[in-house]
Amino acid sequence: MILFDEKERETGSIASSPQPILSRFGRRLGKPLRAALLIAVALTSPLAHAATSTPPAERYQQALAALQADDFGRYRTLAAGLRGYILQPYLEFAYLKATLKTAEPATVNRFLRRNTRLPIDNTLRRAWLLELARRADWTAFLATDVSGNEGTRVACARVRALGATGQTARATALTKRLWLVGYSQPNSCNPAFKRLQRNGSMPAGLVRQRLLLALRDGNPGLARYLVTLLPDTQKKRANRWLAVYAEPRKLLSLNWTELGVRAEAKQVIGSALARMGRTQPTAAHALWARLEPRLKPVLNRAERHRIARIIAVFAAVDGLPQGETWLAALPAAANTAWSREWRARAALRNGDWRGLLAAVRTMPRWQRHLSVWRYWEARALLQTGAVADGRKLADTLSRQFSYYGFLAADLVQRPYAQGPQPRPPDIALQKKVGGMYLTRVALALHRADQTDDAGSVWRALIRELAPAARMAAARLAQAQDWSYGAYTAAAQSGAYGRSPLTFPLAHWRTVRTVAHDNDVPPALMLAMMRQESAFQSTVCSTAGACGLMQLMPATACWIGKRTDLGKDACDLDLLSEPDLSIRAGGAYLGYLMNIFADDTVAAVAAYNAGPGNVNAWLAQPALRADAARWIATLPFGETRRYLEAVLFNRVVYAQRSRPSTEQAPAALRLSGLLGSLSIPVSAK
């Protein structure tokens, strides 16, 4: 147990209290619990009495609250009484994170050695490496840097450590790997790069290589900076690269040899035409028709195919009618799964059912047999009169528990599949899994409301378990009312069908109240929560959306100002509280349902992609009449997948969330959400 660091042991007191550098433990406790615990810090009766009368779980949370309040004396007293408690490592971890700037290497290393099975090992190791770099303690850094995969900031510190300990060749090799990327690196890498330049180890060739990578990855700002690092004799050529990248039509008046050696010229040309193809496919297609014959000496066949493919695909993505024609005209060798997919989507958008059949039938077997293309092939067969073949294909697909399985079932008027179901409870196996160390840690963290850590430990546990044991773990999580734990373990056990484990009624009372207040179906809110966060209340996406309903902070703040949520919705910490996230998400969904006239599909799409994008996509009313087609041809792959998942969840939840005391209404069908399919389903 870490009660105080080595310096404190020597002095016996804290001359100046170390300042916390991380607040996430306080955030995980939840606003009401934080307030209660901070009051408890001030009002609790004498510590000796508290230690004997308060359960360990409460003392653990009080110790965390004491850390948050900078009351290190109280922390040490409480921690002393928690030796052997299942969450003792997390208490030590919280203390080390709060006092890392004054921690002794022996203390941290001892903790790391003792806790290799817990995910906090890697988290603390990375933070400790960055602290050692701040201290310039390079010997300790290299001794601790055992995995070599803690991210770019640590890698840049590793360069400095290698250089400081005389390992110049390794430092130079690593610096070059960090340098040769087409995007900006963290500022902490600058010392390593400057060292390379001072040593004369960064020739102009390395600068040109990175400049070309920056153009390839669409970062002209970085490319312009890199030009300034080149010798004056090479800047004219590099500026010509930038000019061609900005305006590829300049290639009509340039000879490719003016761009340098063949390897560099083809990279500039390929990057410039690919950029134009993505942003201006019509203009790029016309330009490419003129340039391709002239560029055969510099671009090989595969490189020319890539340019033509990018232009054709982005024409289809942009909804241009000619996109289908350009994709169909690509040589077989130019096609990839990506271009074949968009040829089919373009035909679907154009209402070209025969073109859709042709596109699907050019796909390799693995791609054609994906449920999305099996469904659309069935639809195309029905539309073109091959009713018996279409019904046969749809009938087979209808046995799948999936979005397209449900759509196929609607085509042939079959009941929906229920999917693989959980095995009957195995009490002995549940007891065995429940006694495992990681299980006990994860469930204790869940009870302590440390959601992120509980999820990390749970995922580590599931990776170690066989399918039957995962189902046992799912039932243990369900018994603790932990929706994420039950859902994750059950789905990875193979029992991913409709069941209370995989479709839990998480936070049901709050969801039902919020849904009623905002005039939205509660089943729709559950469906979105399942897809957005998998019921993890504190999870944040890479884009910054947080909470059960994954709202962007700006959106949450905006909806807060329109409702009684007020400024609370602007607080990122509070947005991770289940109640506030559900209320803010429900209010925003209600707003979207209102502006899109109760069109569920459009509102859900706008929740993911924004109302502006959806308004632009709704500009084709004929296509919009068939919502399944509209979804399948949206330009954003993320929004397509999101809509399909949420609408599928919505149908399943509509059955799960009906109170048993009510007379069951007619079961909701997916086609009811998407509009009539208007497809002939009777054999001729």
Image: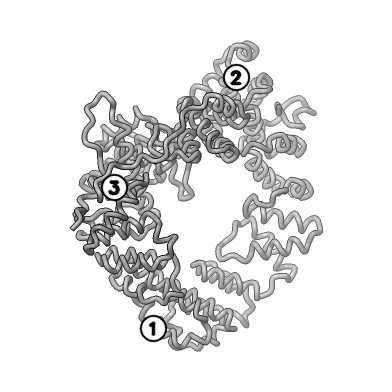
Residue 327 rendering spot, x and y as whole percentages: 36, 72
Residue at the disc numbered 3: 409
Numbered tag placed on residue 289 in the rendering: 1
Helix, strand or loop status at disc 2: helix
Residue 172 rendering spot, x and y as whole percentages: 73, 64
In this rendering, which labeled residue sits more in front, label 3 or label 1? 3
Question: What residue is at 38 percent from the left and 39 percent from the top?
Answer: 529
Residues under labels 3 and 2: Cα distance? 53 Å
Helix, strand or loop status at disc 3: helix
Numbered tag placed on residue 56 in the rendering: 2
From the viewer's side, name the closer residue of 209 and 454: 454
Three-letter code for the amino acid on which mark 1 is drawn:
Ala
Q: Pointers 2 and 1 in contact (CB under 8 A)?
A: no
Three-letter code for the amino acid on which mark 3 is drawn:
Ala
Q: How is the image coloured?
A: one colour
Numbered tag placed on residue 563 in the rendering: none
Image quadrant occupied by the C terminus: bottom left
Question: What residue is at 43 percent from the left and 85 percent from the top?
Answer: 291
